[in-house]
Amino acid sequence: MRSMTGFGSVQIPTQHARIRIEVSSVNKRGLEVIVFTPGDLTRLERQIREEVAQAVARGKVTVAVVIESSPSQSARSLDLEKAASYAAQLRTAGKRLGVSSGPTWSDLLGLPGVVVSTQLSIPPSEDRKIVVGVRAAIGKMVDSREREGRHMVAILRAHLKKMEGVRGKMEKAAGSMRRKQGERLCARLRELAGEAGVTLEPDRVVRETATAADRGDVTEELNRIRAHLVEANGLVSTQAPGGRTLEFLIQEIQREVNTVGSKSGELELTRLAIDFKSELEKLREQAANLE
């Protein structure tokens, strides 16, 4: 199992510039890929998305490709035409206003558009190197997801173990509840029959007691919960993405324990059902960040 939270970055030296690639991911129900590429490198966006889709199944993944200037190449330049235009306008204004000194370079460099950032162009011949770098960054991000996933699996197993313990207690409480309900019902039937002066047939008392006990029986629900817990334990032991399947199992377990709570006629079983739901919610929070 892997977490959906991860990060990876690499730097690639090329003939024209140094390129930094960062890949980060957070949890999301499906897969969403966001790619930031400068200038001409937008041509690689589709391939980058495909690389991500091949590596992960779920999560919001952001890939940022940043071009950094190489030491031998300046990332800024002067727009001399614009500087000359500003200088001419300032000299004209100075004559009209009676200012004898003309503009200095310090004056001109602070004006808009005089100093411009040059967009470094990366030729298609560098595309393969960039894609290899993207794969490396994705690989580091996946590694970090796996490390986090191993930690989360230990937590998941602890929650599942506690839930199975509570389920076993619920099973015992349910058996005790059936016996007590049967005894109370038999006593009540005899009491009502005595008040009405009616003699009850033993067979009918047994049938009525069994029918009432069936209505409050939670054996099937507890058995299904046990089966779901076994499946969840097996799921967290696999390497394949299974976060969505685990979320589905949690929904099924939630449905079953809700039924147990609604059928409960004893305070002890109700309390155990609440304890089980509390542990189930902790499991749900962890599963929401699993791939």
Image (cartoon, rainbow, N blue to C red):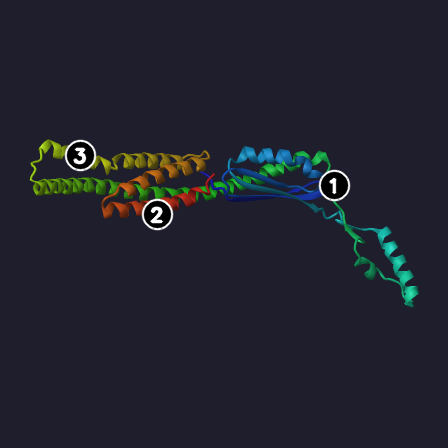
Which marked residue is nearer to the observer: mark 1 or mark 2? Answer: 2
* Earlier-in-chain disc, 1 versus 3: 1
Quarter holding the N terminus is: top left
Q: Do the residues labelled 1 and 3 touch (CB within 8 Å)?
A: no
Residue at the disc numbered 2: 278
Name the quadrant containing residue 10. top right
Check disc 2: other Cα within 10 Å, few if <14, some if 14-19, many if 20+: few
Q: Which of marks 3 and 2 is nearer the N terminus?
A: 3
Q: Name the residue under label 1.
A: 121
For image coordinates 82% across by 61% down, the residue present is 107
The label shown at residue 210 is 3
The location of residue 248, given as percent across then percent down, is 41, 36
- x 64%, y 36%: residue: 45
| CA neighbours of label 1 inside 10 A, class few (<14), some (14 to 19), many (20+) | few
Which label sits on residue 211? Answer: none
Q: Is mark 2 on a helix, strand or loop?
A: helix
Name the secondary structure under disc 3: helix
Give the mark nearer the N terminus: 1 vs 2: 1
